[in-house]
Amino acid sequence: MRKVNNLMFIILAMILASSAMAEAITTRVDQALEAGTLAADEAVFILYNSVYDINAIPLEYSDGATLEPCGTAAFDMLVKLYDSCSVPVQEQLDGPLRGRPNVGSPEYTDETEHFVIHWTDNGANATDQSYIDELTVAFELAWTVQIEELDFDAPPSDQGLGGSEKYDVYVMSLNPGTMGYCSTGGEFPDPTTPEADYSSHIAMSNNVSGYGIENLRETTTHEFQHGVQAGYEAAEPTWFKENCSVWIENEVYDTNGYAQYLHSGENCLRQSWRDIRSPAMYWYGGSPWPMFMEVSTGSPDAVRMVWELCADTVGVNMLGAIDGTAQHYGKDFETWLMEYSCWRWFTGNRADDEHYEYEESSIWTPGALVLPWNNVTMDELPIMLTDSVYGPEALGMVWVKIDVADYDGWINFDFDGRDGWEWGIGVISTKEDGTDSYFTQRIYNQESTINLSVDATGWDEVIIAIQNFTISTFEATYVFELSTVTGIEEGEGATAIAVTPLSNPMAGTSAITVTLPTAGFSTLNIYDVSGRMIQNIHAGELPAGNSDISIDTEELGTGTYFARLIAPGGGCSSRFVVVN
């Protein structure tokens, strides 16, 4: 068994120095409440000031903490804690929390078709007309894309709380680092439904000089998405709310500001072992999760469906809603999560082969992190590895990379996880030319064991993705052995999923043959060499065996393209040339 030596710890320390786990004030407050060292009466003022007055917060909660760009999480916690506060504290909160923000005097209102912007040009909250003009255009665009194009439900009426039934936005002086928030405090629930769906309002910073106008625009659609979410089910957890609000920024704008959360720090690429529900900046660094839902189904409708299913059940139902959405597309939560683990591998520097299906993935540099002890060369086999320092948390995962460029033969993977736990194993095979294939397996047995043999011949790398499906406070422990093997009998290796152009090069009307071992929902997309999706030529059920998917290459033009398949239990890609 390979030991984690001092050199590996030094390398790990260097890697994690650029991926430091920053604590947000909301995280510290939540931990203190859970430990019983902080009362609700104190917590609500810390949360409020985390958005409005950082200097009024005790140092133990503010010193070195990350200021979240979105204050919605703090106000969500405030609303939930209100009923636990003493009557005198509730009375103090009735103004700032239960009422609407006060911009000061004189108060001006600029109305658009769907919004009313409240602002002043005097005092701490002062701004000017040019800034308001930017806001009005940005909020109307947010409405157009989210409500009219993506078909999300409009937020419920506030029954005139802001002076009309239009959506109210207040321009306020917020803490440096906080650009806006959405709050349901003091709002009305939708009287026509039983779930906790509420109207809401938004506060936007009056000064984004440190962020720029592009961040201002992205923040408007980010916060409006929170207002949309509250109209489905306000009680759902923050992690997926923020995942989706960052995702929607990229649906509305092509400025790619969200990518800053994926380069380093807390995100699903550099700290993949963490629970996908992890707090603080991981909320923002988890935005590839709804991006994956969109790509794997061929439509952003999948993300909206999650919120629709949340609204169908009274109370918190996020994981169930994601599972229900996956089932609508012929899968389930665990299958989706396992495919997501494989999907993330082709990001950042590994997206240079330009076949990856989410068009900006090449800017998510440096991409998926393989922990030092999980980088393996063929001359080290046989080798036994364990969960080591960073075993996957609940719903977390890790990658193991094997360099097989100079090896022709099979690799055996013998896994033994914590007994009674459910695991997922993904096997990815890649070539430098952009060709790849992957398949996934679930582990259900009581012993949590599986043995897989993979043909490494002709590939440059084989990557093993180890996914923990079990939600538990106990540690996720496992051990596995990698070894070479000969004499594989027919049928013992990985089940083949394939995508094969009928001819290469292609011209005119042609077809791409998809081979599936099992029937199920599948998507087949065409990408150019810049990574931009050109066509979705299939999104729906396919039978087991071979299916020919028609393609009109005259719509593509002469050039090189990739056909990318996502199917039950795996996926693959194939390069082809069009000559017209």
Image (cartoon, rainbow, N blue to C red):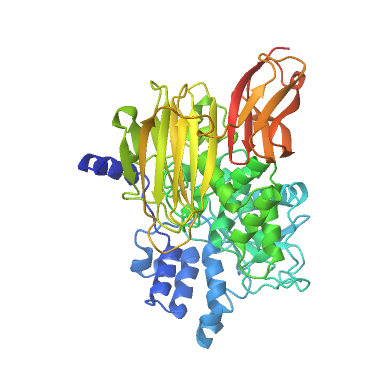
Give the answer, above or below, for where 579 lies relative to 199. Answer: above
x, y (%) of residue 273? 42, 50
Residue 386 visible within the image:
yes
Give the answer, above or below, for where 21 lies relative to 2. Answer: below
Quarter of the figure with the C terminus: top right
Residue at the spot x=54%, y=33% of the render? 491
Residue 367 visible within the image:
no
**Image quarter of residue 121:** bottom right
Q: Is residue 116 left or right of residue 214?
A: right
**Image quarter of residue 522:** top right
x, y (%) of residue 405? 40, 22
Q: Is residue 431 left or right of residue 225?
A: left
x, y (%) of residue 530? 59, 25
Q: Among all residues in the image, which is located at the extreme left?
A: 6
Labels in figure, total: 0
Residue at the spot x=63%, y=74% of the render? 99
